[in-house]
Amino acid sequence: MISKKISRRHVLGSAAAFGAGAGLATALPLRPAFAATTTVGFIYVGPHDDFGYNQAHAQGAAAVKKMSGVKVLEEENVPEDVAVTKTMESMIQEDGASLLFPTSFGYFDPYILREAPKYPKVRFEHSGGLWTVKDPKNIGSYFGYIFEAQHVNGIVAGFSSKSGKLGFVAAKPIPQVLQNINAFTLGARLINPKATTSVIFTGDWSMPVKEAEATNSLIDQGIDVVTMHVDSPKVVVQTAAKRGAMVCGYHCSQAALAPQAYLTGAEWNWTDLYPKFVTMWMKGEEIPNFYRGGFKEGLIRQSPYGPKVSAEAKTRADTVKAALTAGNYVIFKGPLKDNSGKEVLAAGQELIQSNATDAKLESMNFLVEGVLGSLPA
Amino acid sequence: MVEEAAAAIAAPNGTVTRRLLAAASGAAAEAVAIPLGAIVVSLLVFGLFVALAGVNPLAVYGYMVEGSVGSWFSVQNTLTRAAPLILTGLCTALPAQAGLMIIGGEGAFVIGGLVAAMAGVALTGAPALVAILAMAAAGIVAGGIWVAFAGALRHWRGVNETISSLLLNYIAIAILNQVVEGVFRDPRSLNKPSSPSIGYDHMIATIPGTEIHWGLVVGIVAAVCAYVLIRHTTIGFAARVAGGNVRAARMVGLPIARLVVLTCFLGGAAAGLAGMIEVAAVQERASADLVTGYGYTGILVAFLARQNPLALIPVAILLGGISASGGLLQRHLGLPDAATVVLQGIVFVVILASDAVYGRIPWFNRPEGNA
């Protein structure tokens, strides 16, 4: 009897709230009118101002905002679960978005793969370079060979380090991260063949406390240049600068956080790519389903050199960057040994970055000679 | 309540029963009115907060309504987000009946999801129904044992269950990462370590005519079962007696150990089942993405529901609605994502504070209760 009473009240109450809600929503002029503008949605996995992965994409979105005839929607801190599905659908259904940039690597499978067939007229542009021919045609996936810029970071670090000891704060031992560690180390050893890179894996993409601890621990070992591959390099950059070490940035420029200690950085160049893709979409041109590149294709760029970079270092780094831009420089070439002394590339063997199907580059699972650290078995 | 009920049974006298019923209906009205009032107060405080941030509170309320219940799409969005919260809420609400404060829903969710994914991958060739049932059983058992462990530590070793269940969350996440980056890794998941897929054919479907998966129905059924168990069975009564006064319960010979471990097991089983549903209805595989935070939101849900299993359902829907409307607030008003977290925090604090007014509003406590 009592429970009956409660449930009736409950039902009536929630029904009333529901009715009032629906009424209010239709009464208020909230829904945007469909105009001749193209609506583009950007979805970030973390904060849009993280000085890292997400900020690089938000800078691209900001460039799109400046275009005429385009309306930009942004949503941050969207996890890789049902939330991203609902955000994509909401952008499409409630705001009329026709082009989406869900930017986190983990949004692709299964979320984008499942949404794309439901909305065949919407274009999904994913950052990660994961599209294959069996996937829906209204998906595009792009990515940059950012390890080329980490290689240039390594050259600058090799010139700038007095101890020859470099540090790398990394998230997970996955191929993309190993490419960066190896390219950085190979760059530094071009300048100082005795240079070493100590690596600490924090285990996940955003672990601010562990990142600070790792940076401190590296500097305690006498390391004077630190770089990283984590979602937000902010903590590493600030900690290193506070301890008097130099840093090479990653994802986007962190120079503002440490103007003196910042040497240079490996950046994504989404500010060029996104307006280009949006223009193609508005003109009805075909955007490639699979698009990758490095300096040559303009998908990545180098942060301007900081005050501590010598003229000699700038010249050498610029020369290598020019060669990479021209497309006649290979970073991973034999003879190349891993840090246990085993030969991983024989003399004459090359892992050419533009060859996107090169399985050995794509599934890199070794640390080159000069890297101090090991991979989980 | 328990004492009063015992008195009424002992002396089945008309006046006592009538008074008791009046008091009970007053209490029931109070139990609905005070949380609702608290939510209204929270919304007003939140309005003040956004106004200070330079955003029109009326626009915020408008978008919150639109984003949570303003269209069929929004309603489905709200319900989809509410589904796991009912189950993770049970992980705190069930042990609370026996007087335990468990906050280990996140760990049970993760372990349940991981073990369910293992079962799903092992049964790739089996019929879909068999695979789904086996995954559910795996998630239930794994999550149940995980939290029962915290209960056992409490009972036999005197370890504070709040701390141990919290720490078990970190252990669960570490195990998940270790396993999906090691023995249980799909070698093709190069840059995003994940387990193999359980197979699209073995995934839980959506309720016909909607985009909501069956997890919502599972959550509601589980909450109703938990309510019946707690309110209408001797085991539930015994658990509540133990939760009310463990010495008295021991005096009358109740099996405290069994009650503590059982309520913990059932709570963990609910969260483990939520993890299984996350794998089988949403993510298709186990990866670091199983760390969704639903376990922690479940604690909030349980407290807002005052540990009442039935009340978990509307509260989970409320929080689902808040999170569903977060997107519109970001996109149209430029509020940061943290705005919805702030609102959740305000609701939590106001509801806890509202505990102080129970029994102090005369309207609900009139002796002859013609409310």
Image (cartoon, rainbow, N blue to C red):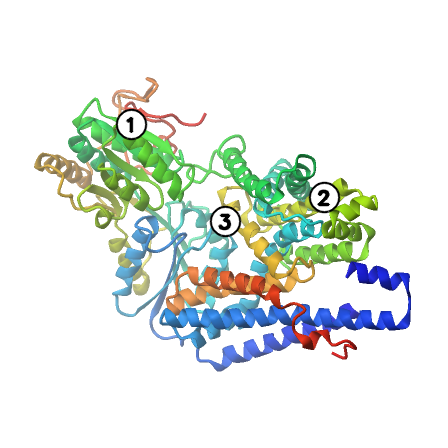
In the picture, measured across the screen, residue B177 lies left or right of residue A187, that is right
Q: Please provide percent x and percent y for residue A214.
A: 35, 35
Q: Is residue A290 visible?
A: no
Q: Where's the C terminus of chain B, which quadrant?
A: bottom right
Q: Amino acid at mark 3?
A: Pro
Query: What mark, if any, has residue A110 been given in the picture?
Result: 3
The image quarter containing residue A239 is top left
Q: What whole-number distance in Å separates the C-alpha atoms at marks 3 and 1?
A: 43 Å
Vertical order, B152 against B289 (above or below): above
Q: Residue furthest top?
A: A341
Q: Quadrant of residue B229?
A: bottom right
Q: Amino acid at mark 2?
A: Val
Between B93 and B366, which is closer to the camera in this rendering?
B366
Indicate the amino acid at tag 1. Gln
Element under disc 2? helix
Residue at horizontal 79 percent and vertical 59 percent from the top: B2
Secondary structure state at the residue bearing disc 3: helix
Marks 2 and 1 share the same chain: no
The foreground one among B300 and B350 is: B350
The front one of B371 and A229 is B371
Q: Say above or below: A174 vs A368.
A: below
Disc number placed over residue B260 in the picture, else none: 2
Residue under numbered circle 1? A221
Mark identifier at residue A363 = none
The spot of residue B147 in percent (x, y) is 64, 42
> Regarding mark 1 in the picture, which secondary structure is present there?
loop
